[in-house]
Image (tube, grey):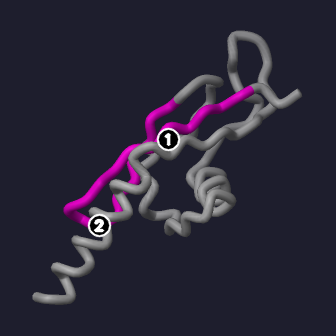
Amino acid sequence: MRREAKEVADAQDLSKMMANVAITIAQKAGENEQLFGSVTSKDIVEALEKQGYTIERRKIQLAEPIKTLGEHKVPIRLHRDVTTEIAVNVVREE
């Protein structure tokens, strides 16, 4: 039980640290702010790594890839009892 409690505590600490995390991902986009491609959990993992967070891709709870510009709230399940949200800003790639 002790290890489980430590995992939950670690996840809660990480959740607090990530509460204000915002990442920006540049993508090519056409009219109506539609992306030519999409932003996937892999893109989010890579952007988080640049900020020093190592998060497994399966923990990113992205229902489907992001296909529009703008800010998107993406839940990250750090532990089965601990989920946090980060802001993913998708901007037009110049």
Mark 1, Cα crowd under 10 Å, few <14 / some 14-19 / many 20+, is few
Q: What is the three-letter code of the residue carrying label 1?
A: Glu
Figure quadrant of residue 74: top left
78 drawn magenta: yes
For residue 53, side relative to residue 69 (left or right): left
For residue 30, side relative to residue 57 (left or right): right
* Residue 21 or residue 61, whichever sits in front: 21
Q: Position of residue 58 (x, y in %)?
A: 46, 64
73 drawn magenta: yes
- Label 2 secondary element: strand
Which quarter of the rendering shows the N terminus? bottom left
Q: Residue at x 76, y 12 (%)?
A: 31
Of mark 1 and mark 2, the one earlier in the sequence is 1
Which quarter of the rendering shows the C terminus? top right
- Label 1 secondary element: loop
Q: Which mark is residue 79?
A: 2
Magenta segment range? 72-91
Tag 1 and tag 2, C-beta contact below 8 Å: no
Q: What is the three-letter code of the residue carrying label 2?
A: His
Furthest residue in direction left, as rendered: 1
Q: Position of residue 53 (x, y in %)?
A: 55, 64
CA separation, marks 1 and 2?
21 Å
Figure quadrant of residue 24: top right
Q: Position of residue 27 (x, y in %)?
A: 77, 34
Q: Position of residue 60 (x, y in %)?
A: 45, 55
For residue 42, side relative to residue 60 (left or right): right
Q: Residue at x 69, y 21 (%)?
A: 34
Instruction: Identify the residue position indicated by label 1 in the image.
Output: 64
For residue 47, side relative to residue 88 (left or right): right
1 or 2: mark nearer the eye: 2
Q: How many marks?
A: 2
